[in-house]
Every structure is written in C-alpha cells, then in structure tokens.
Amino acid sequence: MNHKLDAPSHDCCAAPGLIPVDEALSRILSEGKPVEQTELLSIAHAAGRVLADDVASGIHVPGYDNSAMDGYAVNSEDCVETGVSLPVSQRIPAGQRGTGLEPGTAARIFTGAPVPEGADAVVMQEYCQQQDDRVSINTVVKAGENIRRAGEDIEQGSVVLEAGTLIRPQEQGLLASVGLADIKVRRKLKVATFFTGDELVEPGHELDPGQIYNSNRYTLNGLLRSAGCEIKDYGIVPDTLEATLDVLKQAAANADLVITSGGVSVGEEDYVRIALEQLGELNMWRINMKPGKPVAFGKVSDALFLGLPGNPVSVYVTFLVLAQPLLQKMQGVDQPGPVPLSIRAGFEWKGIGRQEYLRVRIKQDASGPIAELFPNQGSGVLSSVSWADGLVVIEPGMTVSAGDVLSYLPFPGSR
Ligand code: AMP
Ligand code: MG
C-alpha cells in the first residue's frame, strides 16, 4: 500500500468537556470588535497598522508611457525587417521629456524615461548597434514592446488599498507610489499583560532552588510588539487571589485586551480564572488542543480577557492559534489569519483525542518540502519552538503516515 496516496484517517473524536478549537476561535472572534478610533499617520510609520478607509489613487501609475529598457524608441513600422539603420534624432534619459519622434528616426532612451510621441516600441540596446549618429536595429520590432503603459499598475481614481488592509513594507511603497504622505489608520490596540507564578524570576537575577526564569514575558510581549500592539506590562504576579484581583482590575481599566500566562489550570495555586469570574465574566475555558488546553476567555469591564496557560510552548501555540486572530480582528484587519498552508509529513504520528500542534522544521527532499518533527514535543520545551519553522495540525484521532499532507501554520517572521 502506498501511504502517500492515503488521506490521513480520523478514528476518534474530541475529548469530552473540551471545546473544539474551531468553535473556540469563532466564539473568541465573535467577541472581538475593531477599535473605532483612528489617527492620521505618516506612511513611514504605518507598518503593522491597519487602514481605516479605502485609499484611492489621484494619479495614474505609471503617470505616462515609459520605457521598460535601456534602448532605442522607434516606430515599429520603420523596423519591419531586421538590420534597418535609422538616424538617432534625440536622447531621453529618465527624468526628462523628449520631443515628438520624427518618422524614420530613433531616439536613444533609458529605463523609466517617457516614450516620445510618435514612437510605439522600445528596442533593447542588446539588439542595437550605434555608430556615430546612426543605429542599426538587428531585430524585427513589434508595436508596444518594452513600453510600460500609463496606468497599467494603478489607474487614476481606482482603490489601491481597501479598509482593513494590514500595512506591510510593500503597502508603504504602494502608498508612496501614488503620492500619499499620510493615511488614516486605526489606533494601536492596547494590550495589558501579566505573568503569574511564585516561581518566576526575571533574567539577570540569580535563581534560588525551585525558581525559573520568566520566559513567557519575552515571548508574549515580543509577539504582541511584532503584531503592532501597544503593551502595558504588569510583570510578575504572585500566586494569591488578592494580588491577581488587584492586577487584573488595573490591567483591564487601561486596555482593550488583557493577556496573561499561567494560573488558569485546575491547581489550588491557579487564581486567574477565579479572579476573572469575580471581576468580570468567564465565557469559555478548556479547549480541545495540545498544547494549550487550559485557556480562559472572558471579559473584565470593557476589556476582553485571554488567559494563556503557563507552559512556554503553550503560550506560543495558543497565541498563534487563538490570540493573533483576535488581535487582528480587534485591529480592524478584514480577514484575520493565519492562513493554513499544506505540508507533507516527514514522520508518523498517532493522534489522540485533542487537536495537536506539533513543532516542525521544513526541509527539502527529492519530492519537495517536507515537515521534520522536533523529537521532544513536550509543552515545556521552548527549544522546540525556537528550532521550528511552524506547526503542523493533527486533528483529533488522526493517524499520520509519512507523506500524508497536513495543515501547516508557519511562525510569524520565519525563514
Ligand atoms: P501554570 O499554568 O501556572 O500551572 O504553569 C504551568 C507551567 O508553566 C509550570 O511549570 C510553570 O512553572 C511554567 N510557567 C508558568 N509561567 C511561566 C513563565 N512566565 N515563564 C516560564 N514558565 C512559566
Ligand atoms: Mg502557576
């Protein structure tokens, strides 16, 4: 039997009492509303921001028919056979305007320069030989060749970018190309973070026995910063109900969204969920995913609340799967990601009742890209996330054979 042709099989269902990931995500997204306030911002500082309105172009781009090559502008009717010799009547560098092309002549022209009236083609200089003030055209010329037409990229009056577009460097360039210096974007999302755990110590300090470093702070805040959020970081919070209530109240008062790590499980030292229930409402808890089961979602006053588990891998995975789409929705992105891709499995796997997210690195084999598995998939093994390029998704009960095609979520900013 050739496993490569077999679809992965599913032979069991979600673990009881846990919310399926798709349902959890759609419930989370249905609560997330785009921030309403907008601001006018220089395009130079707009990367990572989201357009508030459609943007239309006031000009054609290119603004005029121009040469796509260094060469000679001609009238194609003068060059119906190869080897024609024409006098060179003018020279048009980029940034200058020539005059109308006299019939039976050629204009020396450079990339980006306006094609003169009367010319209908540009011949690449590789096909031309100039001697003194004449050029021989050693090819047959087709009308229209090597001319970039006015408006072929963007037509005057057309919508260049729609409201809800996330601005990347290519959008900054595109906005510049139509001459816009400032654009209207939605304001930055305000996200408050805190990190629960009596065992936590900041890097740079000595560890006492039983203590660990607060790695989640750097992972989570880094992800939020990359996602263009304004972060208010409340740091380490001890495992007491009082401290948790206190910080949650402050955090929610100043943020659109509060994201935390740890303290959402079922242990006696887990106070985040209890504090959420006392100050606001818990809408959802325990999701059918691994890593990341004990995620809590709810509301405190006007802020949404997302409590991520404490395990460092769980933080990263639940951020990617649940938090990032929510952030994008609240930022006003019209189609929140991530968009899953497909990848062949370079390993075998026997699924469990929960939806699993395995850390993989993409390699090339004779048939193309293939996902290699990190050997230790433990939810505390942060090296796996650093090693990996992304996650493959193993649906509940799925049996994976080498070569099966799996859904793949690339990490933001990966190679
Ligand atoms: P918890 O969800 O609070 O029970 O934490 C689960 C595991 O994650 C425990 O082993 C914690 O020590 C660890 N953990 C919790 N918070 C952090 C953090 N901020 N950085 C690194 N590890 C953490
Ligand atoms: Mg804890």
Image: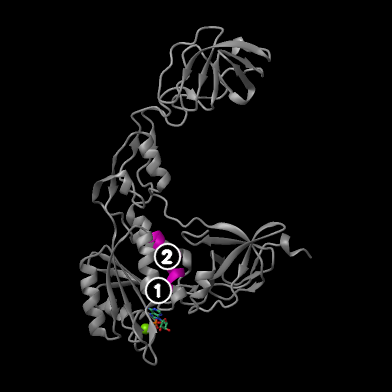
Q: Which residue is mark 2?
A: 322
Instruction: Tell me which amino acid carries mark 2.
Output: Leu
Q: Residue at x 35, y 81 (%)?
A: 263
Q: Position of residue 246 (x, y in %)?
A: 21, 78
The answer to whether 95 is drawn above or below residue 18 in the figure is: above
Quick one: label 2, few (<14), some, or many (20+) residues within 10 Å? many
User: What's under tag 1, amino acid-wise?
Assistant: Val
Q: Which residue is mark 1?
A: 295
Q: Horizontal and vertical percent for residue 20?
A: 48, 69
| Depth check, front residue: 344 or 27 | 344
Q: Are marks 2 and 1 in contact (CB under 8 Å)?
A: yes
Residue 381 vs residue 90, the one in the foreground: 90
Q: Is mark 2 within 8 Å of ligand 1?
A: no
Counting the numbered discs, the total is 2
Picture coordinates of residue 113, whole percent (x, y):
46, 24
The label number, if any, that marks residue 193 in the structure image: none
Is residue 79 part of the magenta span, yes or no? no
Res 174 → quadrant: top left
| Disc 1, SS | loop
Residue 83 in the image: state x and y as whole percent.
68, 14
Q: CA distance from mark 2 to mark 1?
A: 9 Å
Residue lying at the far front of the rendered structure:
132
Residue 266 drawn above or below residue 181 = below
Magenta region: which residues? 315-326
Main SS, magenta residues: helix
